[in-house]
Amino acid sequence: MSTQLHTWTWLTWLAATLVAISVTRNLFYLTLILLCLLVVYSFIEDANQRGAYPFSLLRFGILVSVLSMLFNMLISHFGETVFLTLPEEWPLIGGPYTLEALVYGLTNGLVLFGILIAFTDFNQAMPVRMLIRLIPRAFFPVAVVISIAVTFVPTTIRQFYQIKEAQMLRGQRMKSLRDWLPLVMPLLVGGLERALQLSEAMTARGFASAAPKGGNTAHRLAMVVSMLWVMAGWVVSTRAGWETLGLGLILAGALALLAALWWAGRQVPRTNYLKEKLRTGDAIVLMGIVVIGLALYFPFEWIDRSSLYYSVYPLLQWPDFDPWIGTALLGLGLPAYVIGLRKR
Amino acid sequence: MISFQDVTFTYPGASYPALQSINLEIPAGSFVLVMGLSGSGKSTLLRCMNGLVPHFSGGTLSGTIRVAEMDPVDASPQVMSRKIGFVFQDPEAQFVLDRVEDEVAFALENLALPPAEIRTRLDATLGLLGLTALRERRLDTLSGGERQRVALAAVMALNPSLLILDEPTSQLDPEAAETVLQTLVRLNRDLGLTILLAEHRLERVLPFVDRLIYLDSEPGRMLVGDPRQVLAEVDLVSPVVALGKYLGWQPLPLTVQEALPFAQLAQLPESSDVLISDIQATLPEPVLRIVDLHVFYGPKPILKGVNLSAQGGEVLALMGPNGAGKTTLLRSLIGLMKPEVGEILLLGESIAGKNTADLARLVGYLPQDPNALLFADRVLDELLYTLHSRAHQPHGHRQNSSADTDTSNAEKAAVMLAQMGMADLAEAYPRDLSVGQRQRVALAAIMVAQPRLLLLDEPTRGLDAAAKQRLADLLQTWRDDGHAIILVTHDVELVARLADRVAILEDGVISAQGKPVEVLAASPVFMPQVLQLFPDAGCLTPQQLINRLRST
Amino acid sequence: MKSRWLSPLIYLVCSLVGIVSLLYPFFLPQGTTGAQPGLQRSADMPLMLTVLLGLALLVLVYEVQGQAMNTKLIALLGVLVAINAALRFLEVAIPGPGGFSPVFFLIVLTGYVYGARFGFLMGVLTLLVSAILTGGVGPWLPSQMFTAGWVGMSAAILRPLLLGLHLKGQGEEIWILAGFGAFWGMMYGVIMNLWTWPFIAGPADQYWEYGVGIWETVQRYASYYLLTSLVWDIVRASGNFLLILGFGMPTLRTLRRFKQRFTFIYKPTPSPVAQSNLSG
């Protein structure tokens, strides 16, 4: 736990980030958010030896933004600042190319990029075993499966190389698809045999098959009802003017569902021996999140919330910027500050 | 503590019972060793005690079993697990989580104990098994021996009163095995824990054993009792015991330590004549020549100038401590590691620049886990696959038509199987066979291509005495046919029986090389038991000694 | 007796939610109306629906888990998911056009041999575990998991079908499975691409227009799709097809060989002398 922040702190932070990103289209705010996220990323990378993300995040983000820009410019012909016009007869791409469409595409790309970084930060910050421990108790059998899988992946990869070497010495060459068969089959069969041995070992250690005691009909019923509730809420929310009610219904339904899951989890007799403590770092980050929530939703008079709802169309202009919201959004970068503190 | 009355068990679909009319009484606090060849029912017997047989395996069980005042058939393995801990053979297939302390705490968490108590028990158990320093480590960074200790810790966390272990050291090297066995002895002595251990490697543990159970391959024949009494009636025993029986030493010594006083008293004529298997004609060009080999792993030098050669018609044993570079040497021989300096010459040609698949026509390699090779549906198909792959070698000889190739391949395969005594297994599914059989199938699949040089990497892991004997016979047959064989092993007794030459690789160089009787006599670590008892007799195996005694 | 219809109900509701969440651009009559051009909604709509999808997935997994899991199947699933997740690393390592994914091969075949629930979990967990391991947990994960789960689950439907046609064990079996794999290879891409469409394509009142029916939306998506993920999906579909054709038979044989050992459940027959029999 090299980042030293509690699991729940990270989760809250992630949720806050996602909400912030989805609430606005204002380029200034979006850029601010992205900067905070990138800063957090660089701090986590330093603190962690988790290994680099498979491909360069920055490059991917830029790629996505550029693609989105181009695509929107080519397809969408709205807006008033025209800089290029292709003949209208051309099927999709004919018509005026507008700056608005370009910028709109850019905005969209940035939103996607932001979501990406937010999740990456979360991934990098949480070790795998903590992620697994997040799984609610109701899903204990599935959590065990995931543990086993995570544990066995390195073994499987190692086995693969052993098999490859052994088969090479029988003269096997990788020419056609069929030549992979002697590599894949021992891996599969070996895995199945291991699974048998593992289940024997688990049984001998008292791992009971996970049938819930006393049945779980009531829990499942509760879950279905909550699910229907959520769906109803969503349908309602798509009707103009009923949005808040719909949202409220969805929220209530989701909470009911989570409550049902928690209730189902009570049936599984298990304890967790790890105790994560909440520290000052957590308090700092959480407070920053509260501030963001206030700035975005609490009806203070001096905050100009309309700057959030900036729109590129129909005419491109500079977006407004409210300093209070801007400062609040900086709170998303607080984890970087906390991690930086710890390093000293 | 344990009581079996007239227990008979048959696996589902088997034609004869695995256990027949077993009667057994074991008091609490004993350290019991269960011996027997593969297939004799050791594993079945052990699994009867915690209910895995019949709950996990199915089958028909009759008779009464009582273990720790519970009936395993009635209760389930889950219930029995609170009093009985079971450790299995494969250190890689017992773990659910990826860190030491998580794994050990897993069972405790499942019991829904309060977290504080879990932490206390966790600390205690880790301390008991000497794992406190390793507690935050990931399991896949541990060695086999450490992993088995973690498996032990995982079951000890539940405070069982009976500990059952099914060949826990068979996949480990001798040092690791030693550590695990010593830990068991300590648990038995200090905690009074009843321990039931099934093992092939007996020597280190025999002095601490209260009782020996021997299961014969014929179901029904079982010997129980004091180790010395039981061993007196058993055939496949360690050299010390074999000599003790032949020379009539009483009480029967179980270890070299116990036998030394007898040996010192025994009068043996001095050795002056040349030993068996010493006749050497003029040697042809060696099949393999390694010249001044330096191999690096990254920046670290592993092999620091190895000079070695292997002849056709000879078994060369390569021994050495862990980490000395034996694996690296083997991997260099098959082209998987490139040397910095030095040359490897196969039949006079350097192997530099050739890839592994090219080398396959000259070199056969049996990996530590022969299962890595077996993928086909039938034993016969395994052999045919090798032949078929080989036919597409750039330098391989091609037949005129593919039909001819197929027929001649089928013939070659059949001949190979017959030569190895496995003709009746041609249609069997390889993965259903026993460990020893699978190894022989893998060997057949390699040797059917008639490579000049055969490399074997630790082939005796998990083999019982009979399977080892058959392996030794096979290797001798091939040696006599003119193949060159290099055997990497820790098994000193096998080397004593089989090797024509021994080389010891220590710290990246060959520290000793020559005839077995010279090299093994000079190394305290690798001295066979017979030599430890009779250093001047010049005999490596009990058979040799007995022959010499008979001839005088 | 109450619980007899509960299970199908759960499957129905969750699948409905899943379908709506995945295919919402076709269903949604309108983004928003009103003074504010609902642009601020067009980001949270996909996110919200992902949350919805996630919830449905939770319920579905809970349902499947309750019915299907004993120790042996847990271990089996764990090991198979490990193999599949390891295979997924290959997906990243193979150069060339993306899209090829070796994971569907095992998902389809295990669903076919071991049943719908096993196949469902296989799909869901393969995606989840490989995401955890590659650090690729992202907002598209619920969609991936859901769709992959559906791949495995639907593969089980083939079993009674092929049995009824007396094709089990014949060569045709593999061809049909391969075709199935190819179909899902394409469908997976089509569905996944829908998720990113709102981000890349035009503003709300462009593709969700009041009165613009399903057909128009389909057309617009089709043009978007052609430009973006078609090639990827063709590669994936062909990959699945070839993999199943190439390795299907031996894999099926192996899976079937082990099936008995994994699915047997011990039931003792009560008798005065402790005697136990293999059942089922």
Image: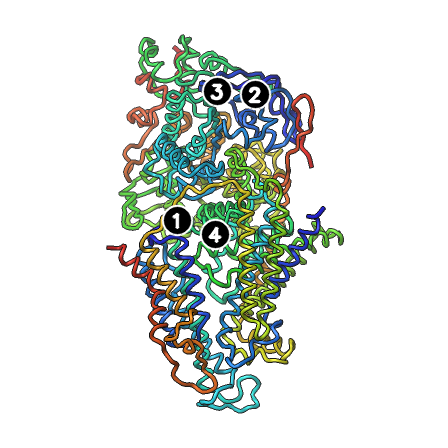
Q: Kindly identify the residue that appears in the image at 34 percent across and 50 percent down.
A: B338
Task: List the residue tagged with mark 3.
Answer: B236
- Residue A84, horizontal then vertical, whole percent: 46, 90
Q: Chain of mark 1?
A: B
Q: Kindly identify which numbered label has been placed on residue C120.
A: none
Q: Kindly identify the residue that appears in the image at 45 percent across and 15 percent down.
A: B227
In 3D space, how far apart are the residues under numbered discs 3 and 4 (Cα atoms)?
46 Å
Q: Amino acid at mark 4?
A: His
Q: Amino acid at mark 1?
A: Leu
Does residue B157 sit above or below B250 in this rendering? below
Task: List the residue tagged with mark 4.
Answer: B395
The answer, for residue B412, to whether it is visible in the render is no
In 3D space, how far apart are the residues under numbered discs 2 and 1 (Cα atoms)?
54 Å
Frontmost of labels 4 and 2 is 2
* Badge 1 vs badge 3, beta-carbon distance below 8 Å: no
Task: List the residue tagged with mark 1.
Answer: B336
Mark 4 or mark 2, earlier in chain? 2
Mark 1 or mark 3, earlier in chain? 3
Question: How busy is the neighbourhood of tag 1: few (under 14 within 10 Å), some, or many (20 plus)?
Answer: some
For the C terminus of chain C, the quadrant is top right
Does residue B168 sit above or below B452 in this rendering? above
The answer, for residue C95, to whether it is visible in the render is yes
Labels 2 and 3 in the same subunit: yes
Q: Kindly identify which numbered label has been placed on residue B66.
A: 2
Q: Please, what secondary structure does the residue beneath circle 3 have?
A: loop
